[in-house]
Amino acid sequence: MFDIDSYHKADTVDEAIALLSKNPDAVPIAGGTDVLVRLHGHNPDYRHLVDIHDVAELKNITMEPDGTIVIGSGVNFTDLAQSAIVSTNIPVLAEGGSSIGGPQVRNVATIGGNISNGAPSADAAPPLLVLNAHIELKGPEGFRRLPLHDFYQGPGQVDRKSGEIMTCLRIGSTDYKGWSGHYYKYAMRGAMDIATIGCAAACKIDGGRVAGIRLAFGVAGPTPLRCWRTEEKAQGSVADQTLLDLVSDSVLGDLRPRDSWRASKDFREQIITTLSERVLKEALNRNGVSIP
Amino acid sequence: MAVGKSVQRVDGVAKVTGKARYADDFTMPGMRVAKYLRSTIAHGRVLTIDTSKARALPGVDGVFTYQDIPKKKFATAGHPFSMDPGHVDVADRLLLTDYVRYMGDEIAIVVADSDLTASKALSLIDVEYESFQPLVNREDILGDDVPEIHKGTGNVVKTHSFVAGGNLEEVKEECDHLIEGRYKTQIMQHCHLENHTAYAYMDDHQRIVIVSSTQIPHIARRIVAEALDMDAGLVRVVKPFIGGGFGNKQDVILEPMVAFLTKNLEGIPVRLKLDREGGMIGTRVRHPFDVKVQVGLDKDGTIKLIDFDALSNTGAYASHGHSIVSAGAAKTHYMYPRAVYSCKAKTIYGNIPSAGAMRAYGSPQMTFAIEAIMEEAARLVGMDSVEFRLKNGARPGDKSQITKKPIMTCGLLDTIRKGRELIDWKRKRKEWPKIQTGQLRRGLGIAIFSYGSGTYPVCVEPASARLILNQDGSVHLQIGATEIGQGSDTAFAQMTAETVGISFDKVHVVSAQDTDVTPFDTGAYASRQTYVTGQAVMRTAEQLKTRILDYASIITGLDVELITIADDNIVIAETPEIAVMSVRDVAVDAYYDKNRGGQITAEVSYKARNNAHVFGCTFVDLSVDIPLCKVTINEIYNVHDCGVVINPLGAEGQVHGGMAMGIGAALFEELMVDSDSGRIYNNNLLDYKVPTIMDIPDLGAAFVETHEPSHPYGAKSVGEAPVISPAPAIRNGILDATGVAVNELPMTPKSIFKYFKKAGLL
Amino acid sequence: MNRNISCTVNSKSMTWQIDIRMSLADVLREHGYTSVKEGCGVGECGACAVLIDDVAVDSCLYLAVWADGCNIRTTEGESKEGKLSPVQQAYLETGSVQCGFCTPGLVMASTSFVEQHKGQKVSREQIRKGLAGNLCRCTGYDGVVRAVEQCIDAEE
């Protein structure tokens, strides 16, 4: 039995907002794969719950007329990977999502939870970062939107204000049309693991030159991080081995991996530089550029 | 013929339908829940403990601390009692302690109406500690002026040494080469899927009934009696289905406590069930070893000596303590029995979780060292790794250097030849470049092993069986030996069917053990049951058969010499196709004839006075991604000489499971301790990397059958041995691929990163 | 903190009063579905896996209230009239059962996988990925992979 002190179930987003506003100590619970683990460990910060597990309006994946892809925060990772909208247009996100935990976890864990718990290891985060995803939140004051990279504030900290619910993630058509991507999860096991390093790359090629490169890493800093300076340096380069070398030489400058009992800093750096090259190479390959 | 055939497990249907009941699947009205208060420091003393708030919490039945428990120390290792005072297990544990020896030590326990109440009560206990420096590494533990974890021990549990097969120093002089290595192995945890759990209640004012997930119900009964200073006859231990043990349930961990609790709470039923986090630190682990080894050899590649200096850390409490390293040294010497074999072994205490028995009991650690240095030796003299083992490995006719007894059956060299073929060694050796370059490299590895079947002559080997002929011509088999997943019940059913002459499905095995009813057997450990208990089962089956035939002779008037049993019928021995009557009809007569007969039963208690050595090898073909520090197994085979294979399907399962655990030891698993604080970082199944199905490749299991003369069906052991050789084979494969010798386990990416960096590969 | 939930368990309709603090595993076990095993309590081992509306879920990490209105399947319900399900039968034939503690969860995860891949060609890699949420310490998974492969081949 979980050590729950108060429990309120919401059927709509507005109900959830009202309940969260009324119970400032409460946390939302959707798939439960994070909150219930903390409750299993008797963590006192999770004893008051607002249950959004069955809020239907959070579970849709749609495409707006301008091509913007909208993914409800309550979509689980199995549905995400099976969605035609996702697998056709932004397969890199399906790759990230299907590397999480195991099948049973993916059947319930939500993309909103994966992002809003602020974990640096969130496997959905690097793909969403390279897709320039925006977060939409709704609170007592109404809606607001912000880029995902601004949503992350520190380890375990995100810009979710009291009373707010993350409603969806939005990916504009210019951020995926013509782009290709790849995500690789480096972990100690082939499943049921948290990433030692997660790496996503996306690229757009124009006439053999880089029209855009985006690179993002998980567990390479206090939050999932984009590699802004490396991306800038790569802009306009010819898509060949020199580009890969440039990226792998530069990428550590954008990141802040650290020592922990799970892995040492120098080991993580080794993996980061290797992955930056290999993951980008695969993303380029998916854009028709094959580098031997 | 039932022996030698792949039969479906006797408990298979119960298990696939979820009907098999384990200890937690039984409950009683009014049952209470107990929970330990574990220390938050690794080394120190409890100065004060205030339980008043916890006691006052509604729903709490009792709170017990070290102040409330019997002050009699007891030993927990699941060994049979030894009549030799020099060979008894170390009694160094109380039910609860005020001297903290590892982070998580049990200092108090709460009994309450629910799990949640018990947890709340634990949070209301205030403890004040005096902290000492945790002693985690050998340098700290054996340092000058360090506190003693157990008074009067100097932090050493025991030391011993032996030299077998010649004069070590003289042979050293004669060797062309002497090479040395130092190898370290990690702390592992068994991670059986069912955690430790037990409950107890009282029958009357004296008798305690314990239901426990244990490999050793009869031993548990004795140890509970010792811990609580009561007669063993007043303790009843019941073992239902158990969800794996791997040695961790060959230790008496929860049973004395649940018995104590019910005894102190007027006999109410109390359940004590460890959660995964508690179980991973509060039960037992595999001993980490630090082994220095020297090998002497001639330039033609003949091994002349193997000399060990092995240190084993048993952690907070002795548990199986020193017997692990001594058993590891003894059982591995059969691999290369023509060399002088010398071992200095020391077992120390440390402020880490207690180490105890774990599958293959010290042999995996020793074999990692032996097979690593043998690889170095083969390379030194320029021999092919396989040829080197074929030259030096045990052969039929070899003798044990320790016992001076001949090895009765030895298929080692045939297992090596078979493994070499399976992996296509010769072709790959020829076709693969000698020196590999690039990011992705491939390697081949081999390692061999030897192991025993049971513990004789070190320990007594008692086994008992009882057979009852039912009215329908079927039999019930009761054994004190325990089915823990390995398939022993099925093997015993096969043996019974074979010897009595009835069909396999007419043998009903009583899978649960109940010490009030079940005949004595010490239980599942040391790969002993098929071999040792099998000898008792065969004798019981013969006795039953004789009694059935005697009675059939009375019914039929036929001379007993003329008849036998085949296919559930009494038949004429010379012409077995002629059935005289069915066994069922014999049974009906025996039960119900008004003037003769009676229930036909048989019971034999037998002490095995023999042991049989098993041999085999692992062959692996692997790839190493150097920049990612990742090892991928392409192909892996274990080949075993375990005598006659009783149930090929079951034996294959044992080999597969052992290989997976061996791969876990090689590449994934380590219980990690912070040497400053003694904190365990990863006491859960997310952070402790038991391999998932994604991490284990297709596994190849093969057998070379010998016929062991000391066993009625020619069988030897197969349960533990498969775990021994995968890790050194993988280590040797990595060496082959990269030229880098990784000399510690596990060879995780972060560990081999350091080696690759040092070697200049990165 | 009590409330009622109605659900179907192995084709039988149930209305249960539950405490909202309970996991689905707690509730199922309390009502006698003891095939649901607890190996970790946090979704790391899969021993408690059941199917909810034919989707495999770790019931230890699932609030019982969420099962309201759902169709739940446990291992107990997979054999009908004394006949084992194809997955259960395949587990026996391939020697995929040892201690049996992970077996009910693995049987359910396998059942879900087999049902979802009816008539499809699947690789061993896909099978592995589909069963990656269940730990087994006894078998090395070798038989498990073959059991699922056998069931899918039979469906073809």
Image (cartoon, rainbow, N blue to C red):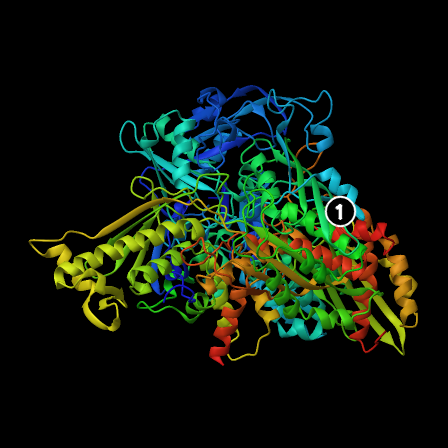
Q: Image quadrant of residue B712?
A: bottom left
Badge 1 crowding class, 10 Å Cα cut-off, few under 14, some 14 to 19, many 20 or more, is: many
Q: Is residue B59 visible?
A: no
Residue type marked 1: Gly
Q: Which residue is more in the foreground, C9 or B702?
A: B702
Image coords of residue A67 (percent x, y): 71, 74
Q: Residue at x 37, y 65 (%)?
A: B2
Image coords of residue B686 (percent x, y): 61, 50
Q: Chain of mark 1?
A: B
Q: Image quadrant of residue B696?
A: bottom right
Q: Which residue is more in the foreground, B665 or B380?
A: B380
Query: In which quadrant of the rendered image does the C terminus of chain A lie?
Result: bottom right
Q: Residue at x 79, y 41 (%)?
A: B173
Say whether residue B746 is left or right of residue B584.
right
- Up the image or down, B661 lies above or below B3; here it is above
Q: Which residue is more in the foreground, B103 or C77?
A: B103
Q: Residue at x 56, y 32 (%)?
A: B318
Q: Residue at x 57, y 75 (%)?
A: C122
- Up the image or down, B195 lies above or below B623; here it is above
Say whether residue B760 is left or right of residue C126.
right
Q: Image quadrant of residue A167?
A: bottom right
Q: Which residue is more in the foreground, B407 or B242?
A: B407
Q: Secondary structure at mark 1?
A: strand
Going by the picture, which residue comes out furthest to the top? B47
Image coords of residue B249 (percent x, y): 48, 43
How many marks the image carries: the answer is: 1
Going by the picture, which residue comes out furthest to the left? B594
Q: Is residue B620 visible?
A: yes
Q: Which residue is mark 1?
A: B296
Image coords of residue B496 (percent x, y): 33, 58
